[in-house]
């Protein structure tokens, strides 16, 4: 008689209905997933089955989660691939909110998000991030002039960050095109750390630190940041638009439409959509935001005129100390 063998599970557990019974201690075998809630861990165990079709986005490739876990445990890459998936809530059927049945909730201080007025037309906003040691992201700013929070569920991450203002320059070793659409930096995080890390730490405005399990980091709108996992790590991050940075988001959507990202392809004008929805729900806030946007644009034009204006017969006069104390972050 033919025998139907149960395939060996990567965590050495056997299926039992929709749950799993372990040959040993599941938590001890779960490696990087050990700190996840039991219910979530059982879902991940199901998705690791060879027959599972569940795939997550790592770099530009959709990987079955089991393949990515195998890769995490057996790679010597200088810059390992990084799982960065924006649809994990839908794929995993997670509930996000403050109720007892929720899998996780947004930290209270980050719940104000004006992109919420867009409902299901808002751009991508949250990501599950998983990666081995040495994986991470090179210097960048968050999309659409949003702010962000990043919560470490497992492992630890090194962060180095720089504020952005009209008079600031990019971090050492980072080169930006005039319209800020192209960012050029060394090919890997390792190269940047070897070549520019010491200089960066002496640069005015530099902030650095290590976030460990259970800690949350805030990335203000427009800040440059580089992140590297110091050990196998899991994190959740989410972008948002607080009232304090509404003008930044409006300016980005209006002035840099070719750089706007994360919106569905059928949304042709994110700026007009956002302004329309914001005007319906928060008209006074929109009025304030547009006034601030106009002030920002007037200020940038004034500073440009100061730099490039002719100075009598002596030709052009250039100046870099504007002296007005304006440290407003710009996208």
Image (cartoon, helix red, strand yellow):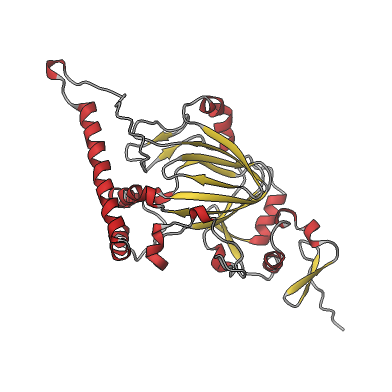
Residue extending farthest to the bottom is: 1
Residue extending farthest to the top is: 314
Q: Which of 214 and 139 is in front in this view?
A: 214
Residue 269 visible somewhere in the drawing: yes
Residue 264 visible somewhere in the drawing: no
Q: Which residue is drawn at 42% across and 50% down?
A: 146
Of the 4 image quadrants, the one containing the C terminus is top left
| Image coords of residue 123 (percent x, y) | 42, 59
Left or right of residue 240, residue 8 in this image: right
In this rendering, is residue 233 above or below 6? above
Left or right of residue 315, residue 297 in this image: right
Q: Which of 191 and 330 is in front in this view?
A: 330
| Image coords of residue 238 (percent x, y) | 51, 55
In this rendering, is residue 201 above or below 232? above
Q: Residue at x 33, y 33 (%)?
A: 326
Left or right of residue 140, residue 236 in this image: right
Residue extending farthest to the left is: 313
Of the 4 image quadrants, the one containing the N terminus is bottom right
């Amino acid at each position: 008689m033919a025998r139907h063998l149960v395939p060996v599970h990567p965590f050495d557990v056997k299926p039992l209905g929709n749950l799993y019974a372990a040959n040993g201690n599941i938590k001890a075998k779960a490696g990087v997933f050990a700190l996840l809630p039991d219910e979530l861990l059982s879902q991940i165990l199901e998705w690791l089955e060879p027959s599972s079709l569940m795939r997550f986005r790592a770099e530009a490739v959709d990987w079955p989660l089991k393949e990515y876990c195998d890769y995490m445990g057996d790679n010597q890459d200088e810059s390992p691939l990084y799982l960065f998936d924006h649809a994990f809530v839908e794929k995993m059927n997670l509930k996000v909110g403050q109720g007892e049945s929720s899998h996780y909730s947004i930290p209270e201080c980050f719940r104000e998000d004006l992109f919420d007025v867009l409902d299901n037309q808002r751009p991508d906003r949250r990501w599950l991030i998983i990666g081995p040691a040495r994986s991470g992201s090179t210097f960048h700013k968050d999309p659409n002039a949003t702010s962000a929070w990043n919560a470490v569920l497992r492992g630890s991450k090194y962060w180095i960050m720089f504020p952005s203002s009209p008079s600031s320059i990019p971090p050492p070793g980072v080169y930006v095109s005039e319209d800020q659409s192209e960012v050029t930096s060394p090919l890997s995080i390792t190269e940047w750390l070897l070549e520019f890390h010491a200089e960066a730490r002496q640069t005015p405005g530099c902030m650095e630190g290590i976030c460990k399990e259970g800690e949350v980091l805030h990335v203000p709108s427009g800040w440059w940041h580089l992140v590297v996992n110091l050990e196998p790590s899991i994190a959740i991050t989410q972008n948002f638009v607080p009232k304090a940075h509404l003008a930044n988001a409006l300016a980005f959507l209006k002035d840099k439409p070719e750089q706007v990202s994360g919106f569905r392809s059928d949304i042709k004008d994110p700026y007009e959509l956002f302004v329309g929805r914001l005007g319906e729900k928060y008209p006074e806030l929109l009025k304030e935001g547009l006034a601030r946007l106009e002030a920002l644009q007037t200020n940038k034009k004034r500073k440009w005129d100061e730099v490039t204006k002719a100075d009598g017969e002596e030709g052009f006069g250039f100046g870099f100390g504007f002296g007005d104390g304006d440290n407003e972050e710009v996208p």
